[in-house]
Amino acid sequence: MQTDLLNKDKLIEELQSNISESINLSEALQSKIDELTASQSIPPNLADPKLSINKPPDEDTAGKQLLKEIPYQDRVRLKANNQ
């Protein structure tokens, strides 16, 4: 009976040490997570340099530009279908 109590005491001590180790590990992990949190790297007021404020091309020239990009044989077929 007394050995059972000693064994239980040892188990309780092991559990307590495991719990304290787990708490320490979780606190360390939480501090690492806090270090890794994302922060905004670009100020919100900064304009996007990829955007331009130039006017879009006129609709008349836009169609001509699209036709220039189409391969010659496809342009011929397209014109033949329209006639």
Image (cartoon, helix red, strand yellow):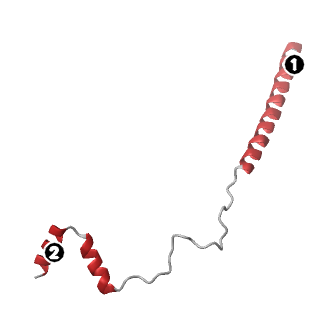
Q: Is residue 45 above or below residue 17?
A: below
Q: Residues within 10 Å of mark 2 (few under 14, many from 20)?
A: few
Which labelled disc corresponds to residue 78?
2
Q: Determine the image quadrant of residue 74.
A: bottom left
Quarter in which the C terminus is drawn: bottom left
Inspect the image, locate mark 2, and give the three-letter code of the amino acid beneath it. Answer: Leu
Name the residue carrying label 1: 5
- Callout 1 secondary element: helix
> Is 64 in front, or is 25?
64
Gap in angstroms between the C-alphas marked 1 and 2:
94 Å
Q: Is residue 42 above or below residue 22?
A: below
Instruction: Identify the residue at image location x=85%, y=25%.
Output: 13
Residue 34 rendering spot, x and y as whole percentages:
74, 50
- Callout 2 secondary element: helix
Q: Is residue 14 left or right of residue 74?
A: right
Q: Determine the image quadrant of residue 55.
A: bottom left
Q: Is residue 9 above or below residue 73?
A: above
Inspect the image, locate mark 1, and give the three-letter code of the amino acid beneath it. Answer: Leu
Residue 63 rendering spot, x and y as whole percentages:
28, 80
